[in-house]
Image: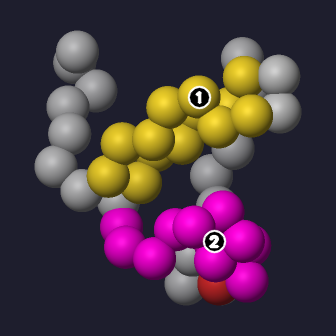
Amino acid sequence: MERVYIDCEQLQEICAQHGVFSLPVVQVFFMGQKFIEEMRGFSLMG
């Protein structure tokens, strides 16, 4: 799995293309398709 950080302050066009309009957001893609999307209040501890 590859991790990529996109700074939405600097790359607003890319964030908009992926439907990111509020932060924080974690999106997970599997085989080129969005598999998971978590927004705002979430825990990485599972």
Residue that protrudes farthest toward the right in the picture? 32
Q: Could you tell me which residue is drawn at 72 percent across and 23 percent down?
A: 30
**What x and y, as percent, mark residue 25?**
41, 54
* Residues at marks 1 and 2, CA–CA distance in whole angstroms: 17 Å
Would residue 34 be seen by someone viewing this image from the given angle? yes
5 left or right, relative to 17: left
Colouring used for the render: secondary structure
Residue type at mark 1? Phe
Q: Is residue 42 above or below residue 39?
A: above
Is residue 15 rendered magenta in the image? yes
**What x and y, as percent, mark residue 27?**
54, 42
Residue type at mark 2? Cys
Q: Could you tell me which residue is drawn at 59 percent across and 28 percent down?
A: 35
Give the residue at mark 2.
15
Q: Which mark is residue 35?
A: 1
Would residue 3 be seen by someone viewing this image from the given angle? no
Give the SS element for disc 2: helix
Label 1 CA crowd tier, 10 Å (few <14, some 14–19, many 20+): few
**What x and y, as percent, mark residue 19?**
57, 67
Q: Which quarter of the picture shows residue 29?
A: top right
Of the residues under marks 1 and 2, which one precedes in the sequence?
Answer: 2
Magenta region? 13-23
Label 2 CA crowd tier, 10 Å (few <14, some 14–19, many 20+): some
Is residue 30 rendered magenta in the image? no
| Quadrant into which the N terminus falls | top right
